[in-house]
Image: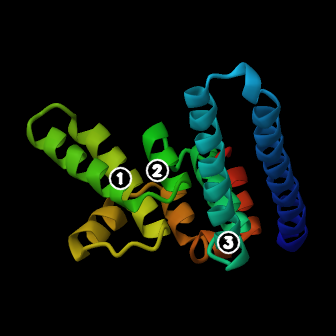
Amino acid sequence: MSSSRGKSENAALIQNAMDQMDRLVNQLSDLEESRAELDPEEFEELSRETREQLVEFEAFLAKMKSGDVSLVDQVSAMQLAIRAAISDAFRTPEVIRFFAQKQPGALRTRLAELDRDMKVGRLGQADGTRAKVEVLAALQKLGESLHPSEEAFLSEHASAQMKEFVSVAGASSAVSEDRVSQAVRGSGN
């Protein structure tokens, strides 16, 4: 199933890339056609911006070609984050976003903010614990190393849905679709 999904998503990515290329080329063509109507500074600025977009697009294509970008891995991470939200493993939109975008640094920052807010009394113990578990589970799922104290905290405070989410096989690129689906279906019981 995931290979056919990967093929269709890759086909969509290729189509989007071709559309982007056409858009940029048409933009350059339109600029040339409108050159007489624009003042020279405006023309140069628009032309420079379009060429910069082409350079960025070429760099993106080079990364894709070298295998540095994996659409299926990124889509799988977003799907896993959505499923975690549906199953109540994650309740905080910010954590869902950081997880889907694979931002462990932002998650670490959020974890430090939670600790601080709990210490100064801005965040209650129950809400703080739940949020901290979400962040730690997201970090662990992204393959980040947890300190032994963080692992112990996660183990002690994680809900059944969170434990199922954390135990789903491997990193986001190796996620078992069936086990995630079972965890989502199981959370509705």
Lower sequence index among marks 3 and 2: 3
Lower sequence index among marks 2 and 1: 2
- Secondary structure at numbered mark 2: helix
The residue sitting at the top extreme is 37
34 left or right, relative to 93:
right
Query: How far is mark 1 from mark 3, CA to CA?
Result: 27 Å
Residue 62 numbered mark, or none: 3
Q: Is residue 149 above or below residue 39?
A: below
The percent coordinates of residue 139 (x first, y second) are 41, 63
- Secondary structure at numbered mark 1: helix
Q: Is residue 47 above or below residue 160?
A: above
Work out which quarter of the rendered image holds the N terminus and state it: bottom right
Residue at x 83% of width, y 31% of height: 33
Q: Is residue 183 visible?
A: no
Lower sequence index among marks 1 and 3: 3
Q: Are marks 3 and 2 in contact (CB under 8 Å)?
A: no
Q: Which quadrant would residue 137 be assigned to in this image?
A: bottom left
**Residue closest to the eye, 125 or 113:** 113
Residue 98 numbered mark, or none: 2
Q: Is residue 158 visible?
A: yes
Give amino acid for label 1: Ala
Give amino acid for label 3: Ala
Query: How far is mark 2 from mark 1, CA to CA?
Result: 7 Å
Query: How far is mark 3 from mark 2, CA to CA?
Result: 26 Å
| Crowd band around label 3 with a 10 angstrom C-alpha radius: few (<14), some (14–19), many (20+) | few
Q: Is residue 15 above or below residue 5?
A: above
Q: Are marks 2 and 1 in contact (CB under 8 Å)?
A: yes
132 left or right, relative to 116:
right
